[in-house]
Amino acid sequence: MREIQVLDKHFELLLSREVIASRVAELAADLKRKLQGETPLFVAVLNGASLFAADLLRSFDGDCELSFVRYASYEGMSSTGTVKELIGLKEEVEGRTLVLVEDIVETGHTISLLKKHLEMKKAAKVMVCSLLHKPTEQVVDAQPDMIGFELDKEFVVGYGLDYKGLGRNYADIYKLKKS
Ligand code: IMP
Ligand code: MG
């Protein structure tokens, strides 16, 4: 589909499922190289990173574990700037290598708070792997270690990303059409 509608908004195709799949495979191979000899704990950030994390792990050829956390920072189409923990990590992380899996880093608030939490729990290493990044919107110094795609200042849905809870189920990524 070239275009979709989610509630009152119209979106157009930005990244096809084929483009996403090949980049995700590259990221998994890159992670494997960087984490040679380690058994990382992948920490996926719900709800947005669920689809990305599933595909990233399917492509990751090595021993690893998976867990989930949930934070809230977004309302509608803008970041609130404050981040609330909804589901925390149950696993012991002291001395471990963690890979935080995010759908998108915008202001950087979510990822910097999560990174601080995990470092406080004495993780040996915390790497951030984000499928998408909006570099011009970043206000907190929390550069992801690995990025799938850089975006301009544009709102996107699909492949886990939502607008008011909808649109996560699309296999491709769409950007908001300028009206
Ligand atoms: P940050 O804390 O501002 O970096 O925001 C990160 C979170 O905001 C992401 O994990 C997403 O859930 C959400 N977000 C940021 N940009 C978009 C977007 O374009 N579409 C959907 N959700 C977004
Ligand atoms: Mg998210």
Image (cartoon, rainbow, N blue to C red):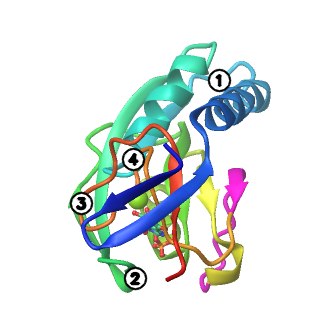
Which range is magenta?
Answer: 139-150
Disc 1 packing (10 Å; few <14; some 14–19; many ≥20): few
Ligand 2, by image quadrant, is bottom left
Q: Is residue 97 left or right of residue 151?
A: left
Above or below residue 34? Residue 71 is below
**Left or right: 145, with 179 as reference point:** right
Viewer-nearest residue: 156 or 127: 156
- Amino acid under label 4? Gly
Q: State the CA–CA distance, disc 3 to disc 4.
A: 10 Å
Q: What is the C-alpha distance between the residues marked 2 and 1? A: 37 Å
In space, the residues marked 2 and 4 are separated at their CA atoms by 17 Å
Q: What kind of residue is marked 3?
A: Gly
**Disc 4 designates what residue?**
160
Q: How far apart, in angstroms, are the residues tagged by discs 3 and 2? A: 13 Å
Q: Which residue is the site of mark 2?
A: 78
Residue 132 % position (x, y): 61, 56
Element under disc 4: loop
Q: Report the disc number at residue 165.
A: 3
In the rendered image, residue 165, in percent from the top left (x then y), is placed at: 23, 60
Please tell me which of labels 3 and 4 falls first in the chain.
4
